[in-house]
Amino acid sequence: MTRSVTVLTNPAAGGGRAGHTGRRAVARLRERALDVTAIEGRTPGDALALLNKAVDSGTDAVIAVGGDGMANLVLQVLAGTDTPMGLIPAGTGNDLARVLGIPLDDPVRAADLVVDDITRSIDLGRSGDRWFATVLSSGFDSLVTERAGRLRWFRGPLRYNAAMIMQMARLEKYSYVMELDDAEIRIDATLVAIGNGSCYGGGMAVCPTARVDDDLLDITVVPGVSRTRLLRMSPTLYRGTHIDLPEVDTYTSKRVTLRCDGMVAYADGERIGELPVTVRSVPRALRVFVDRNHPPRG
């Protein structure tokens, strides 16, 4: 029987290149004899409605063409089901694709992984009724994202660069209460990141030891530091070597509650809401297509 797949594209992702990337992926899937239904979500609500209809109709798989935002939208529908998710990276960050070892710049190879039909079940994080695959962030980084969303006169990466400069000028330490499985910790921090996967922000390995298949969340706490110190730490955050610094604390837990007055949280780059939030690891919550030669790295 011919397998049927639904390809959901965010045409605005990646500065508009997702449309072209999606067409190349669809052509490859059809070339390899899959029955493809291609849909586009112009708004998150539109995309969710189309996706729910496709899943209800019995599609064998859903392929997300876009970035982490599109992947996050798809997993809200597929989490806890047997329907697998494929990824055709076409966003600016593509951190879930990085973790899963999906080719970032080759939609044909990424589409071939769907045809090869090698799947793996991964853990997801859950906060309330929201699922996420990579990192939930709070502190300096989430405030930068919050500010970037208000800068309507900038576009693309320039918006985030401008927001970072503005937020850096107002850098302060934030008072957190963090409840883990076996401890309650009070700490002044610049940022707190909770990782189901290892990276966010286009490859920043903020939780470098996080694994998507260990039933645990990894927590990285960067303490209250000066602007100069934070700038000096930035390269280590990308490499993941910041966890070797004596001032950085790391923890693991199946469940985390974060409290911090006036703070907001983002996960997979999407707004979760104001703290407090409670996050838990949900083992094997999502099936994904993977490359048998490149197992998930984080």
Image (cartoon, grey):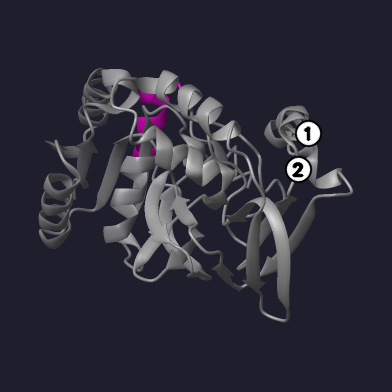
Is 283 part of what is drawn in magenta?
no
Q: Do the numbered discs 1 and 2 sit on residues whose CB atoms are within 8 Å?
A: yes
For disc 1, the marked residue is: 229
For disc 2, the marked residue is: 225
Q: Is residue 39 left or right of residue 235?
A: left
Residue stretch rendered in magenta on the structure: 105-115
Q: Is residue 189 left or right of residue 167?
A: right
Where's residue 287, x and y in %? 41, 57
Q: Residue at x 80, y 38 (%)?
A: 241
In the displayed structure, would residue 293 be above or below residue 223?
Answer: above
Q: Quadrant of residue 204?
A: top right
Residue type, numbered disc 2: Val
Q: Is residue 105 left or right of residue 99?
A: left
Q: Secondary structure at mark 2?
A: loop
Where's residue 269, x and y in %? 43, 43
User: How far is the residue under mark 1 from the one under mark 2?
Assistant: 6 Å
**Residue furthest out toward the front:** 170
Q: Residues within 10 Å of mark 1 (few under 14, many from 20)?
A: few
Q: Is residue 196 visible?
A: yes
